Image: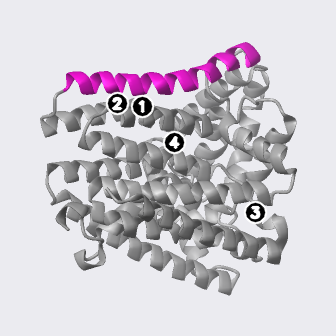
Amino acid sequence: MPNLRVFLAIFAFALTVRVGLILLLDGQWGTDAFLIEDSSNYRLAAAAGIRQSDVMPAYIAFLRLFEALFGSDLIWPILGQAVIDSLTSVAIAGIGSALKPRLALPAGVMAALNPTQLVMASLLLTESLFLFFCTVSLWATLTWLRRPRWFPAIVVGVALGCGILTRMMLVPWALVLPLLLLAALVILRRPLSRAIVQMAAGAAVTAILVLPIAYDNQSRFGGFGLSGQGGAHSLLWLVPLVLETVDGTPHAQGAAQMQNRFAETIARESDPFARSRAMTAAAFEVLRELGPVPLAKAWVYGAAINLFSPAIILASPVRTLPRTGFFATEGADKLDKIVNFLFRNDNAFYGWLLLAGTAGTLAMRFAQARGLWRLLRSGDHMALAGMLLLAWIGFVLAVNGPIASAKYRSPAEAAFIVLLAASLPRRAEQPDADNG
């Protein structure tokens, strides 16, 4: 286990990089540099002062805390995100140390310089806070897998619960993770009785954190659940993006078609949770009409974009360049649209940045595949840890489906960074503490 000085050094380095970037953006472009499409929804929810059915409460509480402490200037919550993302870099170093102590320093340094983390930390979005909770849960999970104990089991439960309170996409992972860990314990021939009790305790902690929101929604909005956003996500995002793979229908046009087709069904329900269920049922009706092939193609395209799109195009100086956005780019089908966006972009400078960033991201993916291969060949425990990281990446890609952007792969960044650190030549790694 690396000593405290290594973790402090990683934190200080990561924080210096992030604060410097934020101050540069603020000085050159003002606080508008921190805003992106979804930012206004979070600002409105925080300003309203009451919890809403379609927004999870953790990030809103985060924004309200900084407003209460420092006022309404946006730079303060962004600086708060810089601190949180610096702690995430430390947690990524912790994941590296849970695999091999010598991976801690390179993993932490890579996280400190990770473009996706840097860009997300400078935007008013849930990504940085969510990544922190996801990373802590992975660190605690891998620590527990090495030696099942009460403390990491409880930390897993707390981190998963807080992560769900930030974004509910974590719910399926929280349900599947105990099964993955149980299988790993069987393969490693570890005693099961105490480990199962510890896993149950962690799951109970997650439930204690999350269930009050579901019950509050029942009393406040008339529907038991965590968020009423799922229906709009399915009908107005998922379905149009599947339609796009069929005939190239632009997302905005597809969403308008779905809104018009099911307007009466949607308007019939006043309860946001009942309305969400109605929209979800309508979405599945359309998906059944389209069949499984367009759905599979949409997921494959979405996973490819999430894997290989460079985060630099979301940075404010690049994102605000005049151009046609990806969703508005025309094409006979999704593949033609991707080709047009990459190679026939109407802003040549943006196009070259996009191509260069994509090439760099592709190179990183090859290196990370090499890191995974090295873990898989390093004994049962390391192989299972590598498979758990791969399962987490696969989950993030699967749950986002065709909704694609570098920001949607953000929860998987901890796994990507650790796999990249594992790909380094051994002479570039810090020696294991137990080997001298």
- Taking the image as shown, residue 78 lies to the left or right of residue 1, namely right
In space, the residues marked 4 and 3 are separated at their CA atoms by 39 Å
Q: Nearer the viewer, mark 1 or mark 3?
A: 1
Q: Is residue 139 above or below residue 221?
A: below
Q: Which mark is residue 150?
A: 2
Q: Nearer the viewer, mark 4 or mark 3?
A: 3
Q: Which residues are magenta?
A: 192-221
Residue type at mark 1 is Ile
Q: Which mark is residue 357?
A: none
Circles 2 and 1: CB atoms closer than 8 Å: yes
Residue type at mark 4 is Leu
Identify the residue position indicated by label 1 in the image: 154
Helix or strand or loop: what does disc 2 sit on?
helix
Q: Is residue 113 above or below residue 174?
A: below
In space, the residues marked 4 and 2 are separated at their CA atoms by 48 Å
Q: Residue 331 versus residue 401: which sits nearer the camera? A: 401
Q: Which mark is residue 34?
A: 3
Helix or strand or loop: what does disc 3 sit on?
helix
Residue type at mark 3 is Phe
Identify the residue position indicated by label 4 in the image: 290
Q: Nearer the viewer, mark 2 or mark 3?
A: 2
Q: Earlier in the sequence, mark 4 or mark 1?
A: 1
**Residue 315: horizontal and vertical position, in percent?**
67, 70
Please give the name of the residue rendered at 46% of the width and 78% of the height, measured from the top-left corner.
Answer: 360
Q: Earlier in the sequence, mark 2 or mark 3?
A: 3
In space, the residues marked 1 and 3 are separated at their CA atoms by 35 Å
Q: Quadrant of the C terminus?
A: bottom left
Please give the name of the residue rendered at 40% of the width and 73% of the height, measured from the top-left corner.
Answer: 364
In space, the residues marked 2 and 3 are separated at their CA atoms by 40 Å
- Taking the image as shown, residue 16 lies to the left or right of residue 170, namely right
